[in-house]
Amino acid sequence: MKQTIARVKQFKGSPKIPGDKSISHRGLILGALAEGRSEVVDILEGGDVQSTARCLKQLGVHITKNENRTLIDGIGKKGFSKPSGILDCGNSGTTMRVLMGVLAGRTVEAQLTGDHSLVKRPMKRVAIPLQQMGAKFLLTQENFAPLTVTGAKLHGIDYELKIASAQIKTAILMAAMSAEGVTKITGEIGSRDHTERLLPHFGVKIDVTKDHLSILGGQPMSANRVVVPGDPSTAAFWIGTASMIPNSKIEMHGISLNPTRTGFLEVLRRMGAKIRTQITEHHPEPVGSIFVETSELNGVTVTREEIPSLIDEIPLLAVIATQAKGVTIVEGAEELRVKESDRLEAVATNLRSMGVALEVFPDGFRIEGVQKLRGSVLPSFHDHRIAMAFSVAGLVADGETTIEDAECVSISYPGFYKTLKELTNP
């Protein structure tokens, strides 16, 4: 499917933002492990979350839908069933990596695979700490899916996390739940913290400081209700658009304002964006409203320390940088090279196709603005965030911009193009 976008003169509205992808995954998985029936409200309907639900069902978890409510009958002490066939994680790195941790200490054997993109993404980084706990994996070429996990007896470890990855951190915590003794994680633990917030919501004690996480294995989990807030990484596309396009005004409600997810807002504010937030709920996640108006933007430097809190928004930030006065530099974002696509290369390819001069580094880029964008035919690289970021670019480019294979947006935002049309024709 192709989508053609033209330049617009204003951008206004109050879109409802789909449920947060990270919290949707975790609500399903923790509900599946708990004793009793859990309820997840306003779960994201995107392809990645459906992959998690499908894999859990294959493991014998009963999941039903009733309008915006997803009901999960947890396995509790019963354990998983032998999976009915290979567990297909689709395009979802979260599904595969977190399930590696979930299944490592369970009494089942399972094979996990994914689509053409996921089977190229590194899995050894997850397997290494889990193997130190006693887990048994067989990986393709010792690093990739398809992979097999055979349930084993696990023991707690002290592990220094080298990569600020919520997926790896969560996989270790999930394995620690079924391990003997205490597991302690230090190092790069500053990535999104939804798992640490939700575990106590399901009755699990976890010690959280700025320097470490520690958890005692074997704790029972009790069912609970999770209301999924709007995804800030999805809302970012409308926030960025409204900041760039004259005569624009956007407001959104019920959005996750988790401080590990608001890095994009902080960077845009440094650029001069007019963004106001208001927290209306605090537990287990801070949730609230975001108000945005057009403003004049200036270039900034984004440092390595900031990357974990805006990793998904970097392609969009590159587009915004072309419309900001002065130089924008992003560094420390090498993790983008092993996402659904090599996102740094994808950004560079598409911006150059639109006439932008930029310098690309192994871990980031340098863009000097303001630069005029020209409409172009652009590949999505089958990557939802690239497709959406360059759809936004099309709104400020001269002429028409066509995004190829645009259906990939359904991974995280099935209604993206419908909402874009509504906001550009208020």
Image (cartoon, rainbow, N blue to C red):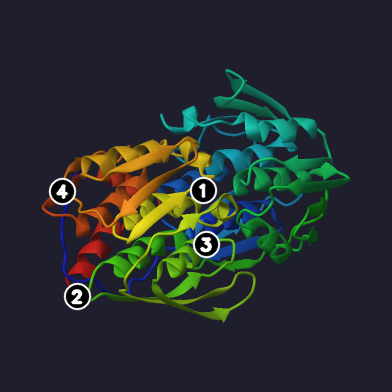
Choose mark 1 or mark 4, whichever is in front: 4
Residue 211 visible, this angle: yes
Choose mark 1 or mark 2, whichever is in front: 2
Residue at 60% x, 56% y: name it: 192
Cα gap from disc 2 to disc 3, whole angstroms: 29 Å
Which residue in the structure is indicated by mark 2? 426
Q: Which numbered disc, 2 or 3, marks the residue that appears first in the sequence?
A: 3
Give left or right: position of 394 versus 120.
Answer: left
Q: Amino acid at mark 1?
A: Ala
Q: Secondary structure at mark 4?
A: loop
Q: Which numbered disc, 3 or 1, marks the residue that appears first in the sequence?
A: 1
Which residue in the structure is indicated by mark 1? 53
Q: Amino acid at mark 2?
A: Pro
Q: Secondary structure at mark 1?
A: helix
Q: Are marks 3 and 1 in contact (CB under 8 Å)?
A: no
Q: Are marks 1 and 4 in contact (CB under 8 Å)?
A: no
Residue at 33% x, 71% y: name it: 15
